Amino acid sequence: MGRRKWVGAGLGAGLVAAVGVGLVVAPAGAAAAPVLPPISPEDLVSSVMTAQRGPLAGEVEVDNALGLPAVPGAPQLANGTSTIRVWSGGEGRGRVAIPSPDGERTLVSDGTTRWAYDSQDRTATRSPAGDHQGPPEGAPGQDQDPTTAATQAIATLRQTSTVAVDGTAEVAGRAAYQLVLTPQPTERTLLREVRVAVDAETRLPLQLTVLAQGSAEPALQVGFSEITYGPQDPSLFTFTPPPGTTVRDGQDGGRPDGQQGRPEGERRTVGDGWDTVIVGRAPAREGGEQQQRPEGAPDLSALGTPVSGPWGSGRAITTAVATVIVTDDGRIAAGAVPQQVLTEALAQ
């Protein structure tokens, strides 16, 4: 994966730092708020963190107003509304179908092996299911469903937040509590609050809404528009590459020639809670060669504005909920924070 593609990955990392993931969805509609028994914020958070996730299937709507251009391999990062399908079979088994303008990207895990298949260029990347060095190539983020994304957000933000229950809502036909996390005054963040709709029966998050400072409208939202709990067809969680597919192994960096690229290097986290910054390095091939930009894809390395400081120089890319700095020497810093917080992290 070359520098330009890693700028796109850096944008995704900024969203991950913002809420524990990279995507968002549309409001639940105008249904009357259901009447539910009162519950304290502490009890609701505790029940979410201990909820047992069973098999499920659903349709997830993604709607965002980040102001990003279309990113190759991640159309859901661009402004607008899109839909993905998710299936979970438990025990690490899952499937995600991500439509794109020219085909579909499919992510499949049987609990042992993880596949990322692109129907447009007929390539499939195979990696161990437990390999979390980064999202599979072609995936806009590591987790594509609101249940996982919202649970991660709560786990990341709960200790540095004021937590409240703000009424109820109906999401995907399910009665839900509205959990609200607001950053404490000491947190340096671009975010005003994160709202999580929690299924009143299963205590699984159904919808995640992210609001930026100075705006009453969601910058990001991800949520189920349909959801069904129960056993899923086991065949959904197996993958056989179609004839003519080029298969790459994740361990070799996805290079068709099978030669080993220079490793990515460890990512590190600076800060915690709302002002968490992720700092990493874009991988390069042996000898410093960068992967060529796909024909027709935008030059992501030209996004943003030039910045410099004691940490070096590069470009800063700012959205409503995240900031990313890509340095000229290949480092990436991302978070739901002002630019100054990123430069401080790069200087450490």
Image (cartoon, grey):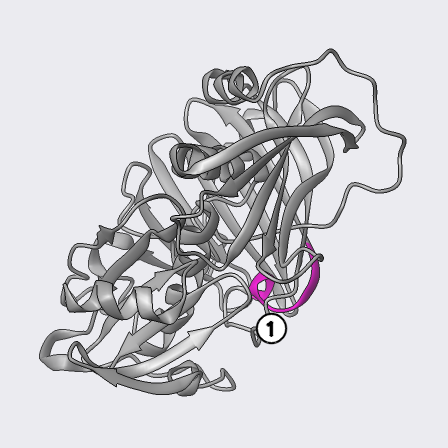
Residue 184: x and y, percent? Answer: 45, 43
Q: Which residues are magenta?
A: 75-82
Within 10 Å of the Cα at label 1, are there few (<14), some (14-19), or many (20+) other Cα atoms?
some
Q: Is residue 173 magenta?
A: no
Residue 207: x and y, percent? Answer: 65, 38
| Badge 1 element | loop
The answer to whether 333 appears left or right of 184 in the picture is left
Which residue sits at x=37%, y=71%? 339
Q: Quadrant of the C terminus?
A: bottom left
Q: Amino acid at mark 1?
A: Gly
Q: Which residue is mark 1?
A: 67
Residue 109, compared with residue 3, is above or below; it is above
The residue lying toward the viewer, choosing from 2 and 215, is: 215
Would you identify the image quadrant in which residue 308 lies? Answer: bottom left
Which residue sits at x=41%, y=61%? 337
Q: Quadrant of the N terminus?
A: bottom left
